[in-house]
Amino acid sequence: MPSSSTASFSPDDYVWKGLTLTDSAAKQIITLAAGDAQVKGLRLGVKTSGCAGFGYTMDLTKEPATDDLVFSHNGANLYVPLQAMPFIDGTEVDFVREGLNQIFKFNNPKAQHACGCGESFGVE
């Protein structure tokens, strides 16, 4: 008799590729954290936002959550909540100068489309 159970997805059961930081992104995280000795790094998350569906969130963190994954490069720590991994796994985090602006850029292989302003992305 066939099973009637429904398959479910749990982020705990998946092997993640991870995130990478460029040298420039690592340097900027260290610069941002230098103002407060209690800051352990930057926390990158995802929220529902914008016209494309999702947006990135970034906050300095003093106390990472117990389910955060940590990705380190050149002494900089990037913390990512496990729940965000299905949306950003494989992403390269960069910090670039564009004209007079300096911003973090996300080279996300899971992003299928982005809004015109670049503030949000969608996955399929």
Image: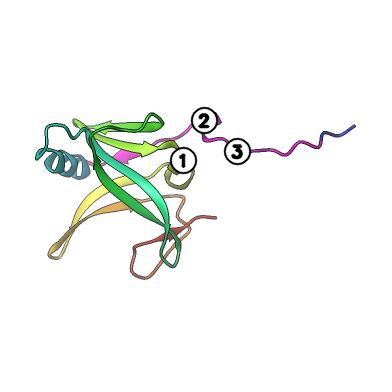
Task: Give percent across and percent down for residue 28.
Answer: 16, 44
Magenta span dominant secondary structure: loop
Residue at 45%, 64% in the rendered image: 52
Residue at 29%, 48% in the rendered image: 58
Residue tagged 2? 12
* SS class, disc 3: loop
Compute the Cα span from label 3 to label 2: 9 Å
Residue at 60%, 38% in the rendered image: 9
Residue placed most toward the observer, 45 or 18:
45
Residue type at tag 3: Phe
> In the rendered view of the protein, which quadrant contains the C terminus?
bottom right
Residue type at tag 1: Gln
Which mark, by number, is residue 33?
none
* SS class, disc 1: helix
Residue tagged 1? 83
Q: Reading the chain from its start, which is encountered first: label 1 or label 3?
A: 3
> In the rendered view of the protein, which quadrant contains the N terminus?
top right
Color style of the picture: rainbow
Residue tagged 3? 9
Compute the Cα span from label 1 to label 2: 9 Å
Compute the Cα span from label 1 to label 3: 11 Å
Question: Magenta span covers which residues?
Answer: 4-22
